[in-house]
Amino acid sequence: MAGFFDVLASYDVLGAFWVNVQLTVWGALLALVLGTVLAVMRISPLLSLQWAGAAYVNIVRNTPLTVIMTFLVLAVWTQLSVTLSRDFTTNFFLFAVLGLGAYHAAFVCEAIRSGVNTVPVGQAEAARAIGLPFLSAARIIVLPQAFRGAIAPLGNTLIALLKNSTVAAAASVSTETSSVMKTMIEIRPDYLWEIFFTFAIGFVILIIPIGLATTWLSNRLAVRR
């Protein structure tokens, strides 16, 4: 095992996991904002907004994340010359965050919409009865309850986002876990299983607390009826 520990010491494994954590945090924030907007569009009384929201969800949700990442780099950056940062490494990191956020926003939208379904119809009708417009009723009455009912599916989406952050390699992020693991295995194939299980255990350590926290929050904040 001494040789394997020497291999581990030669690479910044913890730094690679830290990159994935950063990708997950920023991607989750973007997905939450965009997914909330999409959810409001899908429950809007305007048919055009409903169709636009449904089209985004159906198209993006059924498109592989790798294709989205590759599109951002090869089409948006290379062909359209859109740059998100002057720093080469940061530019690809931001493209990866954009891809992760845009992709998982579709799942966040559906999670919030499932939470909206837990809100009694009478509450929305009462909001309209006292003169609240749609956006005010959604912001003050519907969405707060919907988020409480959607904690568990939102937690599952966050776990999926953390695991999918390894796809950032398709956006040329060479410092995250899958890229580092691939390099380590290529250089030292004699430690293939040890390297693989090291990264697998690392993700288990990151994912289990998220599952426990969202389950606890879901039980604690559930709306009792």
Image: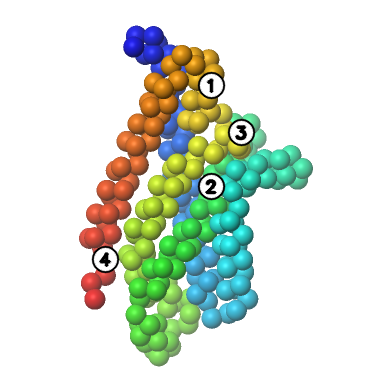
Q: Which element carries disc 1, helix, strand or loop?
A: helix
Residue at the disc numbered 4 = 222
**Residue 6: x and y, percent?**
40, 11
Which x, y percent locates residue 122?
Answer: 35, 85
On screen, residue 175 versus residue 154, left or right, reads right
Q: Is residue 24 above or below residue 31?
A: above
Mark closer to the chain start, 2 or 4: 2
Residue 141 circle label: none
Q: Distance from label 3 to label 1 (Cα)?
A: 14 Å
Give percent across and percent down for residue 146.
37, 69
Q: Residue at x 77, y 42 (%)?
A: 79
Count of numbered badges drawn on the protein: 4
Q: Which residue was labeled with disc 3?
A: 172
- Indicate the quadrant where residue 223 lies: bottom left
Mark 1 or 4: the one toward you: 1
Contact flag, marks 4 and 3 (Cβ < 8 Å): no
Q: Can you identify the residue that label 2 sits on?
A: 100
